[in-house]
C-alpha cells in the first residue's frame, strides 16, 4: 500500500483501468467455475434473481453520482476552483448516502414482493422466500459501496486512476476468497442449505467493498498535497453545484441503469415467454439465470475495456470541452471507439468461434449455454461502443440526448422481447435467443441515434473509426480461420478440466498472435495508440527492453 498517488494521461489511464478490470473480471469469471459447482443449478437461480435485483438498485443509488462527481471535479480543478471542488464532493457524498440507505430499506422491506414479481405463480424450482432471503443478504452492500464509489469518483476526477484500479483488484480478491470459503463451509462443513450458502456468498460483496475502501482511505491520506491547494476563491453556491451534479447525474444514472433494465426486462419476459411456448418451469428458470447472470460474467472479459475507457474518458473529455478544445474531444472519442474495435472485436470473434467449449469450461455441459453466449457476446460489443459514446456525450453537455436515445433503446427491447421469442420459436430457432436479439436491436438503434446527434451538434465525424474497422477485418478473419484450423488439427476434447483449459489457452494464444501481428502491420494498433505510448506500455509489461 506504499507509494504516493500520481495523475495518469488519457490512454495511460485507460490502459491501467483496463488492466485492473481485466484482472478483476477474469478472476470473477474463473471463480465462477468452482462457485457454480458449490451452489449447483438451484443455487445459481437464487443467486441470479437476487443479484440482478440488487444490481439494479445499486446502479440507481451509486452509479451516477460518482462518475458525475469525477466530471465535476475535473472541470473545477481545470479552472483552479479547488474549494468548490471539495464542496461538490461533500455534497455528492451526502446525496449518495441518503439514496443508498433508502435503497437498502426498500430491499429489506419489499424483498418478498420483488421476488414474487419475477417468480409469479411458479410452483416448481426455487421459492419466493429463498430469493427474498438472498435479496436481504446482498442489500447490506448498499451501506458500503456508496462510500467506495464516491472515493473512486474523486480519484478519477483528479486523473489518479492507478489507486482506483488497484482497489478494484483488492475488492475482487477479498470477495472471491470470502465467497468460496464461506459457501463451502456453510454447505459442506456445516451441512446447511444451499440457500444459506448463496446468502453468505452474496454477503461477500460487502466484505470485498469494505477492504477496497480501507485501502483507498489509507492511500489518499498519504497524498493530501495532490488534492489540497490553498487559493483565494469564493466557492460556488450549493444550488449551483447541485444543479451541475444533477445535470450530469441524471443521464449517467439512466445509462448505467439501462444495462440493468435490459437484463431485468429480459429476465421477466423470458420467464413469461418461454413458459408460453412450452418450456417447463425448471428449464425456464435455468435458461433465465444463464442468460441474465452467468453468461454476462463471461462477457465481462469483452466489456472490461469499455468500463476502463468510460472511467478514463469522462474527466479528460470534460476538461477538453471546458477549455473549448473541440478537436481534442473529437480525437479522444474516435480514439476510444477505435480502441474498442481493435481490442474487443477480436476477443468477441474468438469467444463466438469457441462458444461451446468456453461455456463448458465455466459451467459444464449445457443445451442452452453456447447459443446464448454467442448472441450475448455480439450484444456486448455493441453495448461497449454505446457506453463510451454515451459517457463522452455526457461529458460535453449532451446528457439530454443520451437520456432520450437510451430510453428509445429500452422501449424497443421491451416491445420486441416477446414477439422475437415467439418468432424464433416458430422459425425453429431456440426461442430464448429472441430476448438477446431484442437487446441487440435496441442497442443498435441507440448507437445510431447517438452518433447522428453528435455529428449534427458538434460535427463529430467517425471516419477514423470506420477506417479502423476496415483495417481489422482481415486480421480478425485470419484469426478466426487460424482457430478453426487448429480445432480441426487438434479437436476439442469432450471432457471438462485441465486438458480443455490448456486447449483453449493454445487456441487463444495462437489466435492472438495471428491477429496482433496483422493488426500491427495493417496499422490498426498504431491508429489508436501512438508508437511512443505503445513502447511505454510494452516496457512496463517487460516485453521490450528499456
Image: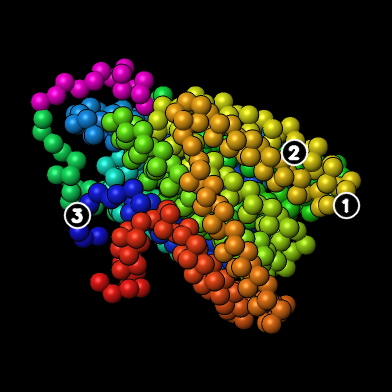
Residue at image location 63% in from the left, 73% down from the top: 482
Labels in figure, total: 3
Q: CA distance from mark 3 to mark 1?
A: 60 Å
- Dot 3 falls on a residue whose secondary structure is loop
Residue at numbered disc 2:
417
418 in magenta:
no
Report the residue marked by disc 1.
428
- Residue drawn 55% across and 52% down? 469
Magenta-drawn segment? 232-245
Q: Is residue 517 visible?
A: yes
Along the viewing direction, whichever of 469 and 349 lies nearer the viewer: 469
Sequence order check, earlier mark of 3 and 1: 3
For the N terminus, the quadrant is bottom left
**Location of residue 11 in the rendering, given as x and y in whole percent from the top left corner:** 35, 51
**Residue located beneath label 3 in the image:** 4
Q: Residue 387: x percent and y percent?
A: 51, 41
Amino acid at each position: 500500500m506504499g507509494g504516493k498517488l500520481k495523475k495518469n494521461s488519457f490512454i495511460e489511464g485507460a490502459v491501467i483501468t483496463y488492466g485492473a478490470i481485466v484482472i478483476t473480471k477474469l478472476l470473477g469469471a474463473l471463480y465462477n467455475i468452482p462457485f457454480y459447482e458449490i451452489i449447483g443449478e438451484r443455487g445459481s437461480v437464487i443467486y441470479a434473481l437476487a443479484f440482478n435485483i440488487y444490481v439494479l438498485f445499486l446502479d440507481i443509488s451509486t452509479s451516477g453520482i460518482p462518475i458525475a462527481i469525477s466530471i465535476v471535479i475535473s472541470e473545477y480543478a481545470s479552472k483552479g476552483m479547488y474549494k468548490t471542488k471539495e464542496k461538490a464532493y461533500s455534497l455528492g457524498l451526502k446525496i449518495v448516502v441518503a439514496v443508498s440507505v433508502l435503497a437498502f430499506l426498500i430491499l429489506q422491506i419489499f424483498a418478498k414482493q420483488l421476488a414474487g414479481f419475477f417468480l409469479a405463480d411458479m410452483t416448481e424450482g426455487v421459492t419466493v422466500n429463498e430469493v427474498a432471503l438472498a435479496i436481504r443478504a446482498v442489500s447490506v452492500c448498499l451501506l458500503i459501496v456508496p462510500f467506495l464509489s464516491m472515493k473512486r469518483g474523486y480519484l478519477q476526477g483528479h486523473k489518479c486512476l492507478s489507486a482506483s484500479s488497484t482497489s478494484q483488484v483488492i475488492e475482487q480478491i477479498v470477495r472471491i476468497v470470502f465467497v468460496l470459503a464461506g459457501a463451502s463451509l456453510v454447505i459442506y462443513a456445516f451441512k446447511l442449505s444451499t440457500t444459506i450458502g448463496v446468502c453468505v456468498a452474496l454477503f461477500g460483496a460487502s466484505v470485498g467493498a469494505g477492504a477496497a475502501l480501507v485501502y483507498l482511505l489509507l492511500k489518499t491520506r498519504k497524498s493530501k498535497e495532490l488534492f489540497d491547494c490553498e487559493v483565494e476563491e469564493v466557492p460556488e453556491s450549493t444550488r449551483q453545484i447541485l444543479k451541475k451534479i444533477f445535470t450530469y447525474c441524471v443521464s449517467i444514472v439512466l445509462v448505467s441503469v439501462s444495462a440493468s433494465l435490459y437484463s431485468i426486462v429480459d429476465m421477466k419476459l423470458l420467464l413469461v415467454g418461454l413458459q408460453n411456448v412450452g418450456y417447463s418451469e425448471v428449464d425456464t428458470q435455468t435458461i433465465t439465470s444463464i442468460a441474465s447472470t452467468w453468461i454476462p460474467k463471461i462477457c465481462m472479459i469483452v466489456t472490461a475495456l469499455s468500463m476502463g475507457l468510460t472511467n478514463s474518458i469522462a474527466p479528460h473529455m470534460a476538461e477538453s470541452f471546458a477549455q473549448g478544445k473541440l478537436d481534442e474531444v473529437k480525437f479522444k472519442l474516435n480514439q476510444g471507439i477505435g480502441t474498442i474495435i481493435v481490442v474487443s472485436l477480436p476477443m468477441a470473434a474468438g469467444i463466438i468461434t469457441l462458444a461451446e467449449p468456453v461455456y463448458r469450461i465455466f459451467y459444464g455441459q449445457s443445451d442452452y449455454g453456447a447459443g446464448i453466449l454467442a448472441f450475448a457476446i455480439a450484444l456486448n460489443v455493441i453495448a461497449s461502443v454505446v457506453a463510451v459514446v454515451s459517457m463522452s456525450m455526457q461529458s460535453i453537455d449532451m446528457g439530454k440526448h443520451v437520456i432520450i436515445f437510451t430510453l428509445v433503446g429500452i422501449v424497443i427491447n421491451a416491445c420486441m422481447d416477446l414477439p422475437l421469442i415467439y418468432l424464433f420459436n416458430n422459425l425453429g430457432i431456440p426461442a430464448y435467443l429472441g430476448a438477446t436479439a431484442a437487446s441487440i436491436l435496441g442497442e443498435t438503434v441507440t448507437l445510431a441515434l447517438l452518433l447522428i446527434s453528435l455529428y449534427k451538434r458538434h460535427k463529430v465525424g467517425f471516419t477514423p473509426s470506420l477506417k479502423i474497422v476496415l483495417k481489422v477485418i482481415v486480421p480478425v478473419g485470419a484469426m478466426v480461420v487460424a482457430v478453426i484450423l487448429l480445432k480441426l488439427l487438434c479437436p476439442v476434447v469432450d471432457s471438462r478440466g485441465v486438458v480443455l483449459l490448456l486447449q483453449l489457452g493454445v487456441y487463444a494464444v495462437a489466435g492472438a498472435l495471428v491477429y496482433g501481428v496483422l493488426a500491427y502491420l495493417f496499422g490498426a494498433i498504431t491508429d489508436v495508440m501512438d508508437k511512443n505510448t505503445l513502447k511505454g506500455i510494452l516496457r512496463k509489461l517487460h516485453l521490450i527492453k528499456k
